[in-house]
Structure formats: structure tokens, C-alpha cells
Image (spheres, rainbow, N blue to C red):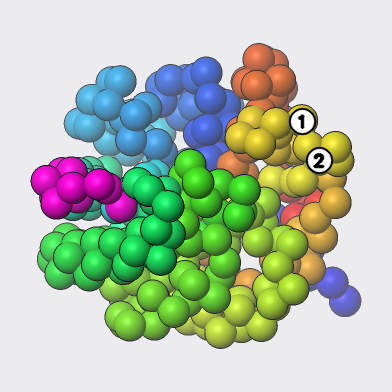
Amino acid sequence: MEKLQTIDRLSLNQITTGKWSIREAVEGCVKAEIPSIALWRHKVEEVGLLESKRLVRDASLHISSLCRGGMFPAATALERQKQIDDNKRAVEEAAELGTDILVLVCGPSPDKDIAMARKMVSDGIEQIVPFAEEYGVKLGIEPLHPMYAAERCVIVTLAEANQIARQYSPEQVGIIVDVFHVWWDPDLFHQIDAAKGRILGFHVSDWIVPTPDLLMGRGMMGDGVIDIRKIRHTVEQAGYNGPIEVEIFNEEIWNRPGDDVLNQMKERFLNHV
């Protein structure tokens, strides 16, 4: 018998309600009885770290992750060091907020040498692992779809993410499986299995056909072509049974009333995840 989903694992990645403040997102989760929330650093900065922490704590919400660290490649040593320093601040913020997962969007190449950019990513992670470990924060490498390689992330497959992550213990570095970014990969299920014990997060949305926009074109679960449930089962078989974040970049969804979005999100989560 197929294992049915429950709301207990649902987490609102707050980018899904992109025009809401942290206060509005927290209040929306409470009203919709969504138990977890994933925060973004720019939203935290809007109201301040301590106020963000208070809002979430007072609402008794679990913080599934903080996004984002990463963005390691840069043209100069000085710029690369600035990114390392920013990642250390992100680790401190995650620890203060009370989450042990920092999501890494690793960053694009500063020039045409994508191989060197990938080495910068590996080197950058190596530099911040000891710092993150001191704070009890795990680094989750999130490979992005190849269409983002030039602008956001040179790590585009789970195989690449696994190769970096396995250099460390699962308590230090793991991977984030986002169905939007990895559903197309012919090696997907093998690589999920290879990540057994070090999957730190699972993100869901859907791939709309035709895709309306490279960045803002994600769909609500059930509106596209991804076999989300099959991927979810495989992730669970690899040992991950934590929060499942709904992460949707879509201007049309952002413009809708947030409460309506959360209600639909819950229904689609139960029926398609």
C-alpha cells in the first residue's frame, strides 16, 4: 500500500509567498496549521535577526532551513574572501534562528572557466566547514538545473553535489534534493541512493509545460510533468524523513492572496507529494 503524505512534514519555503514579510508568513503558517517554515536571509534582514527568531519561536514553528549561503566563485581573491565571510555570517544566522541546515546555492562562474569555478565552490565549502561545525550547522549543497549554470550555480547535478559532500561527514555536509532542479537527470535515482544518510532537505514544486520563465516559472505541485511522489519515495528510501519544503518562484502565485496559496499548497501537497 502506498504511504500517504501528512501535513506534519509540510514546510512553507517563504519564497512561495514572495511578497509576504516574515511576520505575514509566520501568521499564515499558524492560520493554515503548517508546522514548519524555511527562511530566506533577505527576509530576515528586513525585520532583523532577533525579531525574526522571536516571531518564529512565539508561533512554535520549526525552521526547516535557512537560504542561502554559497555564491563562492568570484574574479578576485578579495571577492572570494568576502563570500567566505558572508557564508560565515549565514552560519551564525542559522544557528541563532535555531536551524541546523544552511542551503548552499553555490554560485556562477565569473568568467568562461567553469571548471575553475567548480573548484572555487569546493574550496569555499572546505573553508567554511570547520566554522559551521562549531555552530552545529550542516551545509546542504543544492544542485540547480543546468539552465542556471551561467547565472546562479555551476553545480548542476546530484553527482557533482555528492562528489563534494562525500569528502565530509554527513554531520558536516550533505545535499538538498529539489525536484524542479533534478527531475530530468537520467542518473537521478542512482544519485539519490548514493546520497543515503546525507540528504538534508527535500524541496517540491512542478515543471510547467511550456515553461513561462526561466526563474519565475515554477508551478504548484500537480500542474506539471514531475513525478514528485516517485522521487519522494526514493528520497525516503535513502533515509530522509524530515520536512518537505514547498519552494515556488512564480509571480502569478506571489500576486495571489497568501492564505489562498497556502490552502492550495496544503491540498496539492497531500494529493501530489
Label annotation for residue 212: 1
Q: SS for tag 2?
A: loop
* Kind of residue sitting beneath label 1: Pro
| Picture layout, residue 263 above or below residue 186 | above
Side (left or right) of 49 relative to 6: left
Residue at left 55%, top 40%? 12
Crowd around label 1: few <14 · some 14–19 · many ≥20 (10 Å) = few
Q: What stretch is highlighted in magenta?
A: 73-82
Quadrant where the C terminus lies?
A: bottom right
- Towards the viewer: 32 or 230: 230
Residue 224 visible from this viewpoint: yes
* Residue identifier under label 2: 208
- Towards the viewer: 272 or 164: 164
Residue at left 31%, top 75%? 171
Q: x, y (%) of residue 54?
A: 27, 31
Residue at left 52%, top 18%? 19
Residue at left 46%, top 29%? 26
Quarter assignment of residue 113: bottom left
Q: SS for tag 1?
A: loop
Residue 140 visible from this viewpoint: no
* Kind of residue sitting beneath label 2: Ile
| Picture layout, residue 130 above or below residue 210 | below
Quadrant where the N terminus lies?
A: bottom right
Q: x, y (%) of residue 269?
A: 73, 47
Q: x, y (%) of residue 181?
A: 63, 55
- Towards the viewer: 164 or 90: 164
Magenta stretch: includes residue 205: no
Question: CB of mark 2 within 8 Å of CB of mark 1?
Answer: yes
Quarter assignment of residue 45: top left
Magenta stretch: includes residue 74: yes
Side (left or right) of 68 relative to 35: left
Side (left or right) of 223 relative to 68: right
